Image (spheres, rainbow, N blue to C red):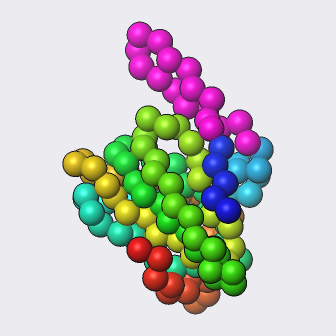
Amino acid sequence: MIKTSKLRVYSDDRGSLAENTLQEVMANSEHFFISKSIPNIVRGNHYHKRKEEWFYIIKGKAEIAVEDIDTKERESITVSADDNILVKMEPLKAHAIKSIGDEEMILLALINEVFDQEDPDTYEYKVL
């Protein structure tokens, strides 16, 4: 149920660069946000009917939990910045992201539509 994609990583004595090679991510992204969470904070606990999101942990570590709102199937994964993976959130999959570990967690989200205050397409659903 949780779909992930490994980024291509280049490393040398200067550090590293993680590169997205999935055309689907860039072709469908119209909006992004960055969230910062202190340890033990949970964000999300909602689902979308239309929106598709890709999450990337820039710093720290997170537990990402997902529940299919129709089948009630649940799954969770732990992702850290060192993993260099994108996590795909599909419509009708309720999700929550918990900052775990001892440091701030920074997350980048790429979304397939621009946020609209009049039609946010966000529905509360407790996962974590």
Reply above or below: 112 against 103.
below
What residue occupies the far bottom of the structure in this picture? 118
| Magenta-colored span | 6-22
Q: Is residue 9 rendered magenta in the image? A: yes
Q: How many marks?
A: 0
Q: Residue 66 location in percent, x, y?
A: 56, 68
Question: Residue 77's x, y, as percent?
Answer: 50, 55
Q: Is residue 23 left or right of residue 68?
A: right
Using the image as rendered, state which of residue 23 and residue 87 is in the foreground: 87
31 horizontally vs 91: left or right:
left
> Considering depth in this image, is 58 or 115 the residue closer to the camera?
58
Seen at 59% across and 47% down, the residue is 86
- Which residue is outermost to the top? 13
From the viewer's perspective, is residue 111 above or below residue 57?
Answer: below
Specify whether residue 36 is in view.
no
Q: In which quadrant will I find the N terminus?
A: bottom right
Q: Residue at x 35, y 69 (%)?
A: 42
For this view, does 61 lie left or right of residue 48?
A: left
Query: Residue at the spot x=51%, y=84% of the render?
Result: 125
Q: Main secondary structure of the magenta part?
A: strand
Q: Position of residue 116 (x, y in %)?
A: 59, 80
Query: Quadrant of residue 36 in the image?
Result: bottom left
Q: Quadrant of the C terminus?
A: bottom left
Is 29 drawn above or below residue 11 in the view shown? below
Q: Judge whether residue 21 can be spotted in this image.
A: yes
Q: Is residue 66 left or right of residue 41?
A: right
Q: Residue at x 40, y 70 (%)?
A: 43
- Residue 128: in magenta span: no
Residue 8 pos. (x, y %): 63, 29
Q: Quadrant of residue 63?
A: bottom left
